[in-house]
């Protein structure tokens, strides 16, 4: 007999007929000798008979039709094209483009163009002071926002392609 099961679980498997032959014999022995098991068995047997004797309720035949009619009366949300303002999207994109361009301009301004050295390019990036503007939290936040925007852009691009493919297959 499975010792990990509670006595109630063992009795249910016995009542439902799922117990093995060895388990059935052990449970029958316990039912003969143990009054607590016998009492619990009688309770569970009454519940089992009550469940088997009750008839399942069926919804009315027009239930589905009634529900669908109620849903049809509700106001359906408009398509996203109607309530997403494209000017806001362009404004957010312009903000990020301005931020990226301003960082690039600041970096280029910090370069000493008059200094000559052994390198072919007159660029010495070691002299650019990034620590004022690129602390760890700022860089992490900036990169996180850019990654999320990139994923959103990729999702939009793939959705447009998927919609075009669907229209072509119809």
Image (cartoon, rainbow, N blue to C red):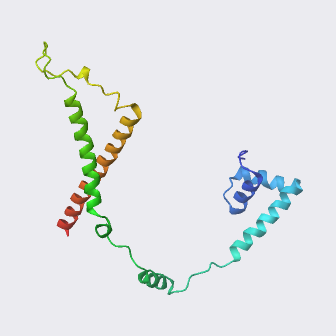
Q: Where is residue 169 in the image (x, y as percent from the top left)?
A: 19, 66
Residue at 80% across / 61% down in the picture?
Answer: 41
Residue at 73% across / 54% down in the picture?
Answer: 10
Camera-side residue of 94 and 147: 94
> In the image, is 80 to the left or to the right of 57?
left
Q: Position of residue 49 (x, y in %)?
A: 74, 72
- Quadrant for the C terminus in the image: bottom left
Camera-side residue of 152 and 5: 152
Residue at 76% across / 56% down in the picture?
Answer: 8
> In the image, is 17 to the left or to the right of 161?
right
Camera-side residue of 113 and 143: 113
* Vertical position of residue 146 compared to residue 104: above or below: below
* Vertical position of residue 61 compared to residue 100: above or below: below
What is the quadrant of residue 69 in the picture?
Answer: bottom left
Number of marks present in the image shown: 0
Residue at 50% across / 87% down in the picture?
Answer: 62
Camera-side residue of 74 and 38: 74
Q: Position of residue 144 (x, y in %)?
A: 36, 41
What is the quadrant of residue 87 in the picture?
Answer: bottom left
> In the image, is 78 to the left or to the right of 97?
right
Q: Which residue is at the far top?
A: 118
Q: Position of residue 58 (x, y in %)?
A: 58, 81
Q: Which residue is at the far left?
A: 120
């Amino acid at each position: 007999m499975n010792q990990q099961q509670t006595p109630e679980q063992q009795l249910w498997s016995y009542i439902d007929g799922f117990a093995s032959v060895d388990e059935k014999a052990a449970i029958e022995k316990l039912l003969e000798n143990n009054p607590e098991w016998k009492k619990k068995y009688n309770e569970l047997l009454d519940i089992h008979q009550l469940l088997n004797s009750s008839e399942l309720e069926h919804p009315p035949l027009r239930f589905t039709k009634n529900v669908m009619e109620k849903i049809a009366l509700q106001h359906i949300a408009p398509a996203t094209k109607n309530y997403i303002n494209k000017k806001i999207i362009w404004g957010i994109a312009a903000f990020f483009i301005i931020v990226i361009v301003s960082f690039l301009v600041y970096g280029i301004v910090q370069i000493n163009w008059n200094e000559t050295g052994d390198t072919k390019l007159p660029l010495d990036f070691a002299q650019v002071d990034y620590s004022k503007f690129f602390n760890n939290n700022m860089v992490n936040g900036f990169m996180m926002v850019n990654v999320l925007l990139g994923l959103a852009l990729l999702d939009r691009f793939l959705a447009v392609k998927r919609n075009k493919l669907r229209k072509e297959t119809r």
